[in-house]
Image: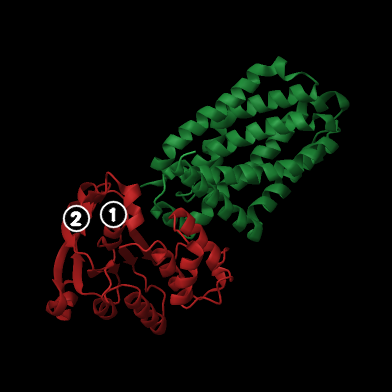
Chain colours: A green, B red
Amino acid sequence: MSQNLRRYIRKIFAIVGKDVATEIRTKEMVSAMFVFSLLIIFIFNFTFDLRAGNVQTLAPGVLWVAITFAGMLGLSRSFVLEHDKGVLEGLLLAPVDRSTIYFGKMIGNIIFISMVAIVVLPVFMIVFNQPFTHVPRLGGIIVLGVIGLSGVGTLFSAMAVHTRAREVLLPIMLFPVIIPLILAAIRLTAAVLDGMLFADMSHWLTILVAFDVIFIAISYMLFEYVVEE
Amino acid sequence: MIELRNISKAFGSRIVLRKISLTVNEGDFITLVGPNGVGKTTLLHLIATLSKPTAGTILINGYNLADSASQLRRFIGVVSHKTLLYDDLTAIQNLSFYAQMYDVTNSLARIEMLLKQVGLWGRQHDLVRTYSRGMQQRLSIARALLHNPPILILDEPDTGLDQHATRQLGDLLAEMGGNSGGKRTTLMTTHNLDWGISMGNRAVVLAKGCIAYDSQGDKISMTQVREYY
């Protein structure tokens, strides 16, 4: 590995470490996301009189609504700290490629949303009476989904943070773009809960992976223009 | 050496800077003054690579800022009225983070030395949010000088400081290479005319987006500075 690449990666993880250290101290973002996602699962559970027949149909959607809505909360806060305290300027003044900031913030978001998903998934399995044997495969789908959500969400969060209505603007911008991701993730989750093999749903898996790769690449290329004037 | 050649900057149809040409020699301490909205911060942002000029060229040590902004950021330290520090991290955590971003070698020793210089050694493990405004600004100077930049940009560093803290700030800047025989090139904006002019060896007054007055050493006339201000 070249020295430049090592430096690049070290800086990315410096940003991740800083975000994690800040979150450990304040617990603002993850705690809000955690409570919100649990509320969604319980509200859906109470709202619909779920009979055995329709649980399989509705459960994947409930899980992904919880993850994406909670993720939205986290993403909307992603750049707020930097923006409100003017620290984003400090990051932009550093002699680093802008993509370092993007990947650092994106990995931080992946960690925070995944932490929430780790807690939400077992609760979801219990509340919707699903066997825990599905957890490893569902975990894999959630990881792919969270990567895509964070990849696009980090870019849009950086765009929205400069506006006054950022909390409103972010979901309006983000949800239409992540429709393919949510659709693929829900289909795959449903397939797992139905006991199907991944091989039978490989086209949805391909869409999910392709979404991650394409949108992270696009976000990587556009981030510089978003954070600079 | 910093050289501005016919720099113009417009935000939409509003022209803020009009064909500004300015040469800043190595070791100069320029105090840039002017009324609010005249373009002082915009000018400093252009030099600090936070913004790009609409027209004109900026050269730092002969290198065009437009071509090598990422590399040239290493030579620039910025202190503004915003501290660019993370409130929920300690002084050590903040400086360690920036040290990683600037590839500072032997960073712990450098951080200890700077914190001692700015009088914050002993409070290094305290959260920045617990510091007074004056202490935060001193830490901000330590942050800006962490990578020992040959160019220091100070954008109204005295904002929000009482007289005592402003005096302390002035002493610190003089001690840390402002104009007391050090080679550091400094550009500072302030609304505190007497204090600002006494700090520098050259005074520049900006009015209506142009340089209205530029004088140095004994030739600086406070009467004229006030007249153009």
Q: Classify mark 2: residues with Cα within 10 Å, few (<14), some (14-19) or many (20+).
A: many
**Residue reaching furthest to the top:** A200
Q: Which mark is residue B46?
A: 1
Dot placed on the residue nearer the N-terminal end, 2 or 1? 2
Subunit bearing disc 2: B
Query: In the image shown, does A17 or A59 lie closer to the viewer?
Result: A17
Image location of residue B128, percent across then percent down: 54, 69
Looking at the rendered structure, the secondary structure element under dot 1 is helix
Image location of residue B86, percent across then percent down: 52, 62
Residue B95 appears in the figure: no
Residue depicted at x 17% and y 75%: B225
Query: Would you say B28 lies left or right of A34 here?
Result: left
Distance, label 2 to label 1, CA atoms, is 10 Å
Looking at the rendered structure, the secondary structure element under dot 2 is strand
Quarter holding residue A203: top right
Q: What's the amino acid at mark 1?
A: Leu
Vertical position of residue A117 compared to residue B39: above or below: above
Image location of residue A103, percent across then percent down: 51, 42
Q: What's the amino acid at mark 2?
A: Leu
Residue depicted at x 46% and y 70%: B139
